[in-house]
Image: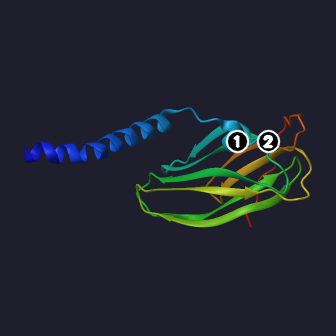
Amino acid sequence: MMESKRFTNRLPLIVLGVAMLALLVASCAAPVDTKEEWGNLTDPFFSRSEDENGVVLEWSGFARGHQSGEGSAFVLVLRNGSEDVWQGRYCIQLLDSQSVVATLKQGEFSLQPGKDWGMQETILFPDDLSGGDYGLVLVIPGQLSIGETIQVGNETSAYGGTWPEPDCP
């Protein structure tokens, strides 16, 4: 009889726990409304570059809908697949068809063999940036770089040329 009473007293807590678990599972499985979460950003991208030593540079973000004077988030991942400590610096630069427009972020890293490092970087675009297509480049000086064409503003013409070489300070 005592066991039955303990179960009856805990029944509301058990029901509440099951309901919370069901809501959690449902919210994880629900589709994400990209427009609501990311504003006007569209055209997701993912880029990856690997050198002969097994170090990997990856990043992802959105290619269209960035605005001058505003920030946009990009995810950076470095993977050290080599047998040595990998340390250095990175920079993110914005390019137009002729030159480097701005160095938007810089940082340093140190990775043990077999380790990864990842972070979300918010890139603030310059206030005086004209609308149009730009090259956004993630660079590990002397090793790797990857770039994407992004659109700032609402201009729809697409740049089809090559971007100049980045030059991290």
Instruction: State the SS at label 2.
Output: loop
Please tell me how crowded label 1 is: few (under 14), some (14-19), or many (20+) other residues with Cα within 10 Å. Answer: many
Which quadrant holds the N terminus?
A: top left
Residue at numbered disc 2: 65
Residue at numbered disc 1: 62
- Residue at x 71% of width, y 37% of height: 35
Q: Position of residue 55 (x, y in %)?
A: 51, 52
Pointer 1 with pointer 2, Cβ within 8 A: yes
Please tell me how crowded label 2 is: few (under 14), some (14-19), or many (20+) other residues with Cα within 10 Å. Answer: some
Instruction: State the SS at label 1.
Output: strand
Q: Which mark is residue 82?
A: none
Compared across the picture, whether 81 is left or right of 60 comes to left
Q: Position of residue 133 (x, y in %)?
A: 85, 42
Q: Position of residue 79 (x, y in %)?
A: 49, 52
Residue 46, located in which quarter of the rendered image? top right
Compared across the picture, whether 165 is left or right of 139 comes to right
Q: Residue furthest left?
A: 1
Which residue occupies the foreground of this view, 128 or 100? Answer: 128
- Residue at x 66% of width, y 43% of height: 37
Numbered label tally: 2
